[in-house]
Image: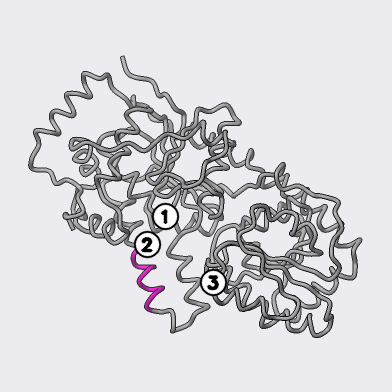
Amino acid sequence: MHHPPLLDVLIISELPLWPLDRGFRVHGVNMAKALRGLGMRVGLSTMTEPEQKMPGELEQMHIAWPTADAVDTKRFGLGWSGRLMGLRCKLAEHQDLGGPQMAGLLTLVERTRPAAVIAVGQHGPMLLRGLAWAYPNLPRLWYAADEPVSFQLSMLRREGLGGLRKRARLAAVFGLMQMCFNRGNIAHRLTSAIGVSPGDTRRLGMMGGCKALTIRNGVDTDYYRPDNCHRIPRSCVFWGDLAFEPNVDAATWFAKNVWQQLVYRWPDASWTIIGRRPCRAVRELADLPGVELIPDVQDLRPQVRASSAVVLPMRAGHGIKNKLLEAAAMGMPILASPRAVNGLRFGEGRPPMMVCRGASDWAESLNSVWHNPAQAGAMGGLARQWVMQYHAWSHAAQQLSSHLQSIAPDQPIYVPSGERLLSRLETQQSTEQPSVRREAA
């Protein structure tokens, strides 16, 4: 007789999943809620506890990260064992992660007995590999979203030689991380990796040597919905984490190359920038005519809905832009760069937004939206219809649920306590195997 799973899915992360101010938190939390909406038993656990209290539904799914004992620390280390054990430990130390802290995942899995474990965030492969020896039949999925090496290279193309050292170092670290923790003995590899765009998925499969699939991000269409409020004439809005490099690059480029043209032509034009942690470069934009910076708002929806258009002049980064999906769900007219619409699913029709390629194209397109309210309203309505058809979280959850069913193990995952105790005793008596410690580097 074998123990059945207690959870259908356990979603884990090194960092807290609340508040929803970063990409991995947005897709991790919303996927958890959508899977729960399908009737699945879902648990959430993070190595670092959130500083802010989570909403009720997330609090119900939350499970505290336990402290590992010496036996589980050794068992976790066996998952990291092999020829690259030393390099794995060095990479973990470089990222300020310790084996005993991560090994709490083994205790967590033993207590909750999930049918599958999904890790979100860039350090997901480190956590998941530690399960490989103790639970070889447990499906382990990395919900990576963006492929981190490609992200760093996209920033290098914008920064030029000045950013070469920094970007090359980060690309090397994340490339090594994928190869060291995803590859190796086939029994220790990830079951699969999930990207949010076809390009990211392809690169995840190549770098990690594992099966990869695309599950595009969704959006909460109930929270982000249209509102028939008055829109300020000749206005536009941009939002995001204002210390995140692609957002900083987009805002500063738009200010220098597009906004100066527009405000010269229309002195009453206004551009609102909303977001948390504005860096110095973004704060300086507030000195420009017609520009208003609103940092750290609790609810950005009123400011967005009051604007005549959303501008997304992204030139770097990878994956799907959550802000674009949010704008579409609110029925906003959207102007976006080609990079901002990469990875989206449009079916056979045209994108329900204006795709702008150069500074003059941006200026003329925005001017057109400002002075054709009927056209702008129709564009916003089509954007709402499109996002509900192709990018609802319920669709993404159905896709992930089908994938989990396809990779369900043939052999039992969990064994009776007597067999588990025997395994723990054998591990404790084994002194020749290395354990994962910060000193192992």
Left or right position of 153 against 107 = right
**Residue most extreme to the top:** 1
Left or right position of 301 against 91 = right
Dot 2 and dot 1 residues touching (CB under 8 Å)? yes
Instruction: Name the residue beneath numbered marker 1.
Output: 122
Dot 2 and dot 3 residues touching (CB under 8 Å)? no
Q: What amino acid is at disc 1?
A: Gln
Mark 2 or 3, which is nearer the eye?
3
Main SS, magenta residues: helix
Mark 1 or 3, which is nearer the eye?
3
Instruction: State how far apart marks 2 and 1 are (Cα).
Output: 8 Å
Q: Which residues are magenta?
A: 165-173
- Locate the N terminus and report the quarter of the image it occupies: top left
Disc number for residue 174: 2
Q: Nearer the viewer, residue 187 or 144?
A: 144
Instruction: Name the residue beneath numbered marker 3.
Output: 279
As drawn, 428 above or below 379: above
The residue at 79%/49% (across/down) is: 226
Q: Nearer the viewer, residue 274 or 340?
A: 274
Instruction: State how far apart marks 2 and 3 are (Cα).
Output: 25 Å
Q: Secondary structure at mark 2?
A: helix
Q: Nearer the viewer, residue 351 or 9?
A: 9
The residue at 55%/59% (across/down) is: 319
The quadrant where residue 368 appears: bottom right
| Label 3 crowd (10 A; few <14 / some 14-19 / many >=20) | some
Q: Earlier in the sequence, mark 1 or mark 3?
A: 1
Dot 1 and dot 3 residues touching (CB under 8 Å)? no
Q: What amino acid is at disc 3?
A: Cys
As drawn, 315 above or below 2: below
